[in-house]
């Protein structure tokens, strides 16, 4: 992002005035006599206790023992205590209070075409059986239990069963290698692990139990491993430690009591990769993460009973638990898919929407950029009329791909609800909604209750200018710190300006009040004294018809201080001999758009860019690989081979 940002975009979507009164956001505002979104934002951020209490009541979050105080800030804004003296269990609010309800809670499809559906009543029974299975192994309140499973109904059942007995959920990305599992399980002190024999990708079985066994040999505290039979792959079962799901869980009684927990008891640890050092475990509680997830799902994507919500995700990324907690708290239905999204053809995603009548679809910009080259026929051959909106998170958009999804796939009538925040947020800092107009790539504003702002280098608020994204007041979903490492938590978010959470993203607010997230602030380029964001470079390159995606990094330069280096992924039709011409064309485009002082030092071509499961391009790893430096924690990458290719390309 340049020091000043071009906000020349026009409003491309406006709310439907006939349907907006029925939205959660409009209903909440009417209930509290708030006439505009601006009024809601002002009150929700200036009176955090009022807003939190109002949200808890709106979501019908029930407590066994009521809280005496909404929030206690006696330990500082960095360490608030929420719902003081309150006793509850989030599973009561997701399942127990819906006992007997026949409406679907979960619909699932596997890559091979297998389908299953569970009603709220059926899901409750299976969660009870899994809870009884855990208790039969001696597991209970406070025990940490890992989830290394494919996206099948059993991963949802397990997640909820762990919470039901008061234990702590440790979600693990299903594509992790053994080392990543060991580091997280060991740091958390986990004593049990759920896994599967394997999963399917492009019709091929992918082993998971073998990876789990390799990890288990290095986790001294691990006592139990529960294994789901998904693929039929032969596996080794260790006597006394390993248990088949169908033998242990399916034979349990259908009723189980729900453990009473403090509102602030730990519910879940989600590990995120740090730039350096070991992964950091964000701590989340029963009254924290699920409440924020449900609030954002209600006020942003407007999920209601009868809606079918699909977010392409893995349970090891925060959007997996977010989908589970949000849909069930709102009485909606979640959709899960286990398999490759382009199998047997690139239209599999649109086929899923048509077959199951999906109403809210969560994607990433990277996925959409990958679908565009396959042409408009892929989505045009399917009936997508069930869709009410798209949602997106993971990384910034470029206008061309945003407009393709909005205009070509969505017909210019369905909003793209952009969503940006993080694991430590329990959801969003900024988000679109059904009440505010939208420009391409923009966010309607900060989420209600999020006292967000954009500050310059001196800590002063700025508009129509790029700055640091910050939060100035606590919110119920904020992480309770990093597991066993409070100092690292304070240094990461609270060390720059007093009582101000600095998120690490560059952002901007335009004169119409719309927000833009422009990439990680630690990805910033400063070339010849001019500040530049990678998204700005990559948006220029995306306009070339041969470029699928790109990543821009800054490298040390004796003259400029920093020089621009770009890695591009091209369409397969571009052979190596033609790449020198391609390099010339791309360089000319960048000079024409950004100016000659920002001309790239090098343009390199690779077959893939290193990404996390949620499709974030890891520029810090690209930069490290290019410079021959230590890449840091690479365990979250879905394609670690891409890092090695970058080293060779350099």
Image (cartoon, helix red, strand yellow):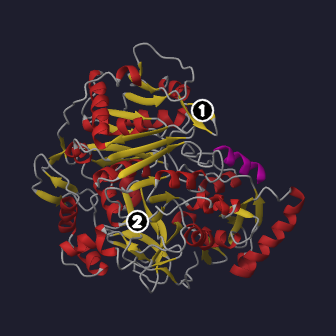
The answer to whether residue 600 is above or below residue 14 is: above
Residue at (30, 61) in percent of width and height: 295
Question: Could you tell which of marks 1 and 2 lies nearer the N-terminus?
Answer: 1
Residue at (55, 24) in percent of width and height: 232
* Circle nearer the viewer, 1 or 2: 1
Toward which corner of the image does residue 185 lie, by quadrant? top left
Position of residue 358 measured from the top left corner of the image (x, y, whole percent): 46, 56
Q: What element carries label 2?
A: strand
The answer to whether residue 516 is above or below residue 189 is: below
Is residue 507 part of the magenta span, yes or no? no
Label disc, if present, on residue 534 of the rendered structure = none
Q: In which quarter of the image is the N terminus?
A: bottom right
Toward which corner of the image does residue 366 lie, by quadrant? bottom right
Q: Residue furthest toward the right?
A: 577
Q: Is the magenta stretch mostly helix, strand or loop?
A: helix
Position of residue 530 measured from the top left corner of the image (x, y, whole percent): 62, 78
Nearer-the-camera pick, 621 or 558: 621
Magenta stretch: give its range.
Answer: 640-650
Query: Taking 577 as reference, is 349 left or right?
Result: left
Q: In which quarter of the image is the C terminus?
A: bottom right
The answer to whether residue 334 is above or below residue 20 is: above
Label disc, if present, on residue 502 of the rendered structure = 2
Residue at (56, 52) in percent of width and height: 351
Query: Taking 446 as reference, is 67 left or right?
Result: left
Is residue 644 part of the magenta span, yes or no? yes
Q: How crowded is mark 2: few (under 14 residues within 10 Å), some or many (20 or more)?
A: many
- Give the residue number, with chain letter if any, for mark 1: 206
């Amino acid at each position: 992002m340049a020091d000043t940002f071009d906000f020349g975009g026009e409003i491309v979507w406006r709310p439907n005035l006939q349907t907006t009164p029925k939205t959660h956001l409009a209903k909440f505002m009417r209930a509290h006599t708030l006439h505009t979104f601006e009024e809601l934002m002002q009150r929700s951020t200036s009176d955090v206790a009022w807003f939190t209490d109002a949200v808890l009541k709106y979501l019908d979050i029930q407590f066994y023992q009521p809280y005496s105080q909404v929030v206690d800030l006696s330990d500082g804004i960095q360490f608030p205590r929420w719902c003081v003296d309150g006793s509850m269990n989030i599973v009561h609010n997701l399942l127990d209070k819906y006992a007997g309800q026949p409406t679907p809670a979960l619909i699932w499809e596997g890559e091979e075409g297998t389908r299953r559906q569970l009603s709220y009543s059926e899901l409750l029974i299976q969660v009870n059986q899994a809870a009884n299975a855990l208790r039969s192994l001696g597991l209970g309140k406070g025990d940490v239990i890992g989830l290394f499973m494919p996206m099948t109904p059993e991963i949802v059942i397990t997640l909820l069963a762990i919470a039901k007995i008061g234990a702590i959920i440790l979600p693990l990305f299903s594509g992790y290698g053994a080392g990543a599992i060991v580091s997280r399980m060991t740091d958390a002190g986990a004593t049990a692990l759920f896994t599967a024999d394997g999963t399917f990708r492009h019709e091929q079985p992918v082993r998971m139990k073998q990876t789990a066994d390799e990890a288990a040999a290095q986790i001294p505290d691990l006592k139990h491993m529960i294994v789901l039979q998904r693929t039929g792959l032969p596996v080794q079962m260790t006597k006394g430690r390993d248990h088949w799901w169908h033998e242990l869980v399916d034979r349990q009684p259908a009723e189980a009591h729900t453990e009473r927990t403090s509102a602030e008891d730990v519910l879940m640890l989600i590990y995120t990769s740090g730039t350096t050092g070991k992964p950091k475990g964000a701590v989340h509680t029963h009254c924290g993460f699920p409440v924020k997830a449900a609030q954002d799902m209600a006020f942003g994507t407007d999920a209601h009973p009868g809606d079918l919500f699909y977010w392409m995700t893995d349970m090891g990324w925060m959007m997996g638990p977010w989908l589970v907690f949000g849909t069930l708290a709102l009485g909606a239905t979640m959709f899960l898919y286990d398999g490759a999204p382009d199998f047997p053809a690139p239209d599999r995603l649109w086929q899923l929407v048509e077959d199951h009548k999906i109403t809210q679809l969560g994607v990433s910009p990277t996925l959409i950029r990958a679908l565009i080259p396959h042409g408009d026929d892929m989505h045009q051959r399917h009936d997508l009329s069930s869709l009410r909106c798209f949602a997106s998170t993971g990384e910034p958009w470029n206008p061309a791909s945003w407009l393709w999804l909005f205009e070509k796939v969505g017909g210019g009538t369905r909003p793209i609800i952009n969503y940006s925040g993080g694991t430590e947020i329990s959801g969003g800092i900024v988000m679109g909604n059904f009440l505010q107009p939208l420009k391409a790539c923009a966010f309607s504003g900060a989420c209600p209750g999020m006292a967000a702002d954009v500050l310059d280098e001196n800590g002063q608020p700025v508009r129509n200018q790029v700055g640091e994204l910050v939060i100035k007041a606590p919110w119920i979903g904020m992480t309770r710190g990093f597991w066993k490492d409070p100092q690292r938590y304070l240094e990461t978010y609270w060390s720059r300006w007093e009582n101000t959470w600095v998120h690490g993203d560059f952002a901007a607010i335009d004169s119409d009040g719309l927000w833009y997230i422009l990439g990680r602030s630690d990805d910033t380029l400063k070339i010849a004294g001019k500040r530049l964001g990678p998204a700005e470079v990559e948006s220029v390159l995306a306009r070339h018809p041969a470029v699928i995606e790109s990543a821009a990094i800054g490298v040390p330069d004796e003259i400029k201080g920093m020089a621009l280096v770009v890695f591009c992924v091209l369409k397969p039709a571009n052979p190596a001999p033609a790449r020198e011409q391609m390099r010339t064309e791309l360089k000319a485009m960048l000079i024409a758009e950004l100016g000659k002082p920002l001309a790239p030092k090098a343009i390199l071509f690779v077959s893939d860019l290193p990404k996390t499961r949620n499709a974030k391009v890891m520029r810090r790893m690209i930069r490290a690989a290019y410079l021959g430096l230590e890449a840091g924690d690479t365990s979250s990458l879905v394609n670690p081979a891409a890092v090695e290719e970058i080293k060779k390309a350099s």
